[in-house]
Image (tube, rainbow, N blue to C red):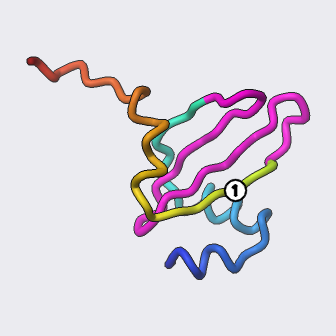
Amino acid sequence: MTLPEFQQNLKEDQAHLIWQRGNFLLMRNYVKHRILLYDMGSFYAEIWYHLQSNKIVIIRSFNNICFLEPYLALIDYPDLTL
């Protein structure tokens, strides 16, 4: 599936596609949201949950790696030696 094909779907359908086809990578918190990052093969997708309402409020999909920057600090490199 390509990014434009994915983006043509409704938010609810996008969520199902992410859960069915995506590979979970990382989770982060931002203000009142929990954001889950998935690898979709040729692009990435984020599911933004609002913590108080426990609802999906945003699904953001992208293929520009600059949007991965908020996740860099969350990656653990236990075998990396300097």
Residue at the (90%, 35%) spot, across then down: 53
The picture places residue 16, in percent across and down from the top left corner, at: 70, 62
Look at the image and say whether residue 31 sits in the magenta stretch: yes
Q: Nearer the viewer, residue 2 or 69?
A: 69
Report whether 55 appears left or right of 69: right
What secondary structure is found at the residue carrying circle 1? strand
Look at the image and say whether residue 40 sits in the magenta stretch: yes
- Identify whether 39 is placed above or below 55: below
The picture places residue 77, in percent across and down from the top left corner, at: 26, 24
Which quadrant would residue 27 be assigned to in this image?
top right
Q: Which secondary structure type mostly characterizes the magenta part of the structure?
A: strand
Residue identified by numbered label 1: 59
- Identify whether 21 is placed above or below 66: below
Report the quarter where the C terminus lies.
top left
Q: Nearer the viewer, residue 71 or 53?
A: 71
The picture places residue 78, in percent across and down from the top left corner, at: 24, 19
Residue span colored magenta: 29-56
Report whether 23 appears left or right of 48: left
The picture places residue 22, in percent across and down from the top left corner, at: 52, 57
Residue type (three-letter) at the residue carrying disc 1: Ile
Q: Residue furthest front?
A: 66
Q: Residue furthest right?
A: 53
